[in-house]
Amino acid sequence: RHSAPRVIRACFPRDPSRAWHSRPHAMQSGESIYDLIPPPEVTLSRPPMHRSAHPGSVNPLHFGKSQRRANGTFGKAPGDVKPETTRFLKRNTGALNGTTNSVSDTFPRARRTTKPPVPKATDRPLMGLCSSKNFIAANAIENILAKPPTKTKPQKATDKKDYGRVPTYLLTIKQQIEFEKQKALREYERSLGENSGLNGSSQTHQTRPMSTDDRDELLYSLKMKWQKLNHAYAGLSFSLDVPSHKRRKEDLEREMTQLEKDIKSLQGKQVVVMED
């Protein structure tokens, strides 16, 4: 069925850019000159009534389902097997045919409760219990007679027995380092002696360990030289079409690699100087 079309009047302002906040007189009085112009009438048509494509005799619960047979699946269909309230397991009708468990009769289990039983509704608690102790006075007397806590002053570092002494573990580490240095020096002298014997030269060379200041100065100079070579290597062009550019790059890489090896050999090791 189709009813008569409804007429709805929609209010659209002529100039949407003019907001209500730009017309304070309209907000104060509640009237506006735009209300004098009648708005256009919009007619809405009603859509046709929905009608189902399925007949009304079909049960909606069976949509898209095939009819099940009685025993066509694993077992019977749900709802076919209903329990019988009169058929239940009764006493002395099981598989043991009424035999009793002798183990349970021989060793009866005593029921142990870890919690106290729940009080009954008729039990009345003990009421009217009170103490004659004055807790305020007892607390005051206890605090008055209490002794003040004794504060122990922290011991000064200068009063300790081991003040100013080198720890034992540092002395042990120094001894180990010195032993390793002497061992490395003897090994180096022995290798020099073997090399001189193989070469057939009777000339002996004196060796001495390099001082820490000399080693640091040598390391600093090697690192400065490596930094200059690295700066020159970074300034090379990306294109290596010219043979001279390629040769220059290979020379810089060779020198930087050798400097890195020398710096690594000087760091953290005992350096021995051989004098002629």
Image (cartoon, rainbow, N blue to C red):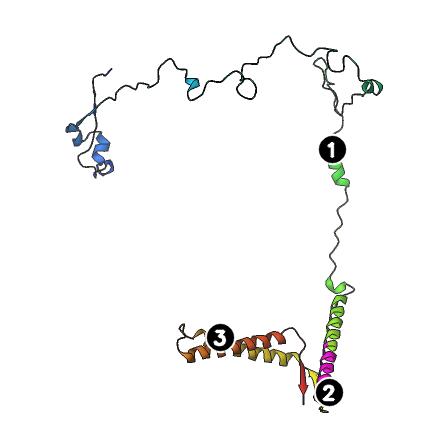
Q: Does residue 196 appear to the left or right of 84 in the view shown?
A: right
On the image, the x and y values in percent for residue 125 come to 73, 18
Quadrant for the N terminus in the image: top left
Res. 58 image quadrant: top left
The residue under label 1 is 137
Q: Main secondary structure of the magenta part?
A: helix
Q: Secondary structure at mark 2?
A: helix
Q: Does residue 221 appear to the left or right of 127 in the view shown?
A: left
For residue 243, say whether it is visible.
yes
Could you tell which of marks 1 and 2 lies nearer the N-terminus? 1
Given the image, on which type of amino acid does mark 1 rest?
A: Ala
Res. 54 image quadrant: top left
Q: Residues within 10 Å of mark 3 (few under 14, many from 20)?
A: some
The answer to if 262 sits in the magenta stretch is no
Q: Secondary structure at mark 3?
A: helix
Given the image, on which type of amino acid does mark 2 rest?
A: Gly
On the image, the x and y values in percent for residue 158 come to 74, 65
* Residue in the foreground of this view, choosing between 148 and 42: 42
Give the spatial CA distance, label 2 vs label 3: 42 Å
Identify the residue at the far left of this view.
37
Q: Residue at x 56, y 75 (%)?
A: 260
The residue under label 2 is 197
